[in-house]
Amino acid sequence: MTDAEIRAVALATLLSIAPEVETDELRGDRPLRSQVDLDSMDWLNFLLGLHEKLKVDIPEADYARLIALDDVVGYLHKKLGGT
Amino acid sequence: MIEFKLPSLGSDMDEGTLLEWKVGVGDTVKKGQVVAIVDTTKAAVDVESWQEGTVHQLIAEVGQKMPVGTVMALLLESGEKPAPGSAPGVGAGETVIMAAPVPRRMVSPAARKHAEEEGVDLDSITGTGPRGAVTLQDVEAAAAALKQRPAPRAVSAEPAAKVADKAAEKLADMRKTIAAAMSRSKREIPHYYVAEDIPLARALAWLQAANAQRSMAERLLPAALLLKAVALALRRFPELNGYWRQENDNAGFVPVAAINLGVAISLRQGGLIAPALLHADGKPLTLLMQELTDLVKRTRAGSLKSSEMNEATITVTNLGDQGSQAVFGVITPPQVALVGFGRIAERPWAENGGLKVLPVVTASLSADHRVSDGHRGALFLLELNDLLQRPEELDQ
């Protein structure tokens, strides 16, 4: 998958949790949770949604690396075999 | 004859609007069965029956707004025959004073939700359901027609604006409800507050090890540990778990054996609801986490049960996700206590003459001074602290 495709999946997953989010206004390099007011349950559901859609396991130890949307996309890109 | 009345779905509820009957005349009703969906200012709630019987008469009509305590239906007890002249049916009651019906479109909850999602104006739809009710199929058809029609922007924007207005109206109603309940709380309940910093190194290490063995869908959040610890601590402090009741000149505390934690859940559109995790002290962490996840999901989707809305015996609020170090909450009457948690964060921690860095959470207790004293409140927080130092014992 390309970064753009992964980003689209991530945004679709985000919208299923926070439907009011204006994705065009999201900054990819800023902390995602604070931009869209996701609590820990929302965040868990977001990661779970990515896991289910992309069949990627995300160990809890990696959660701390996933801060901004760009981090999430880059992480998933590597997990999916990208370089 | 059993009178099925509109229950109070929280101390802040004065009235509700019947959205849908889930039973019909002649149906057998079991304990705990959902018989109706009622809209409150906070959410659409599945109202359960706590008595068994056979539906004899549906008195309330869909769309009717009524005060708490209004008889909505009559049920026949087991073996009971209807009284002569008491005709079964819908809206045929003579002995019950009913609130005046409010003109309102009859719309199923699913249809209303879908209309909001699609920006469909319900007033523009002709309902094909019973008595002209707008069904999900009606909304889907209208949404499809809307998408196919090359409408000018100004016209297509109008329904969305109306939907936004309705959402704003709903939010305003919820704020009024919260304002009334919290004003009453601060007016009537003499609050006292105590707080305790609790190191969570052991609890989080245990959680990390436990989660490493679990699939993503089964992982636990720290909130599950905190809730379970609160529930277990309450077993030793029954004066914090129950209701302050006042009837005429008689007032006093009524302890409740069941420990039902009201979990404060913020809604994405604004406002909050605190539905109950029932019997939280007796549930293993995996089940508690599943129920918490389900409760949050259903709260935000607007599909709670009446037992979840009116059976909380204490409230727990957690503002750690919002970055607050501590929260000192307002008690939800008629409850007599509220436990608050702030952010779990690394902090310097002095112990045995040494200094280290540990994850720490500030737990607070707001409690009713008519029922308990600060001394007992402080002991409760110490018990909470102690339980969180033995996390493996929470999973029972």
Image: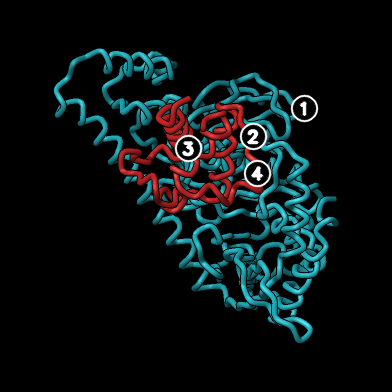
Instruction: Kindly identify which residue carries mark 1.
Output: B78
Q: Label 4 amino acid?
A: Ser
Q: Residue at 25% x, 30% y: name it.
A: B159
Q: Residue at 26% x, 22% y: name it.
A: B124
- Same chain for mark 3 and mark 2? The answer is yes
- In the rendered structure, the residue with mark 4 lies on which chain? B
**Looking at the picture, how far across and down is residue B16, in whole percent?**
47, 42
Visible residue check, residue B95: no
Instruction: Kindly identify which residue carries mark 3.
Output: A73
Q: Crowding near pointer 1: few (<14 within 10 Å), some, many (20+)?
A: few
Image quadrant assignment for residue B346 = bottom right
Mark 2 vs mark 1: give the one in front: 2
Q: Crowding near pointer 2: few (<14 within 10 Å), some, many (20+)?
A: some
* Residue A20 sits above or below residue B230 on the image: above
Q: Residue furthest bottom?
A: B353
- In the rendered structure, the residue with mark 3 lies on which chain? A
Q: Label 2 amino acid?
A: Asp
**Colour chain A appears in:** red
Mark 2 vs mark 4: give the one in front: 2
**Colour chain B appears in:** cyan
**Looking at the picture, how far across and down is residue B272, in whole percent?**
49, 52
Instruction: Kindly identify which residue carries mark 4.
Output: B307
**Distance from label 3 to label 4 (Cα)?**
42 Å
State if disc 1 and disc 4 touch (CB < 8 Å).
Answer: no
Q: Label 3 amino acid?
A: Val
Q: Secondary structure at mark 3?
A: helix
**Distance from label 4 to label 1 (Cα)?**
24 Å
**Distance from label 2 to label 4 (Cα)?**
37 Å
Q: Label 1 amino acid?
A: Ser
**Distance from label 3 to label 2 (Cα)?**
14 Å
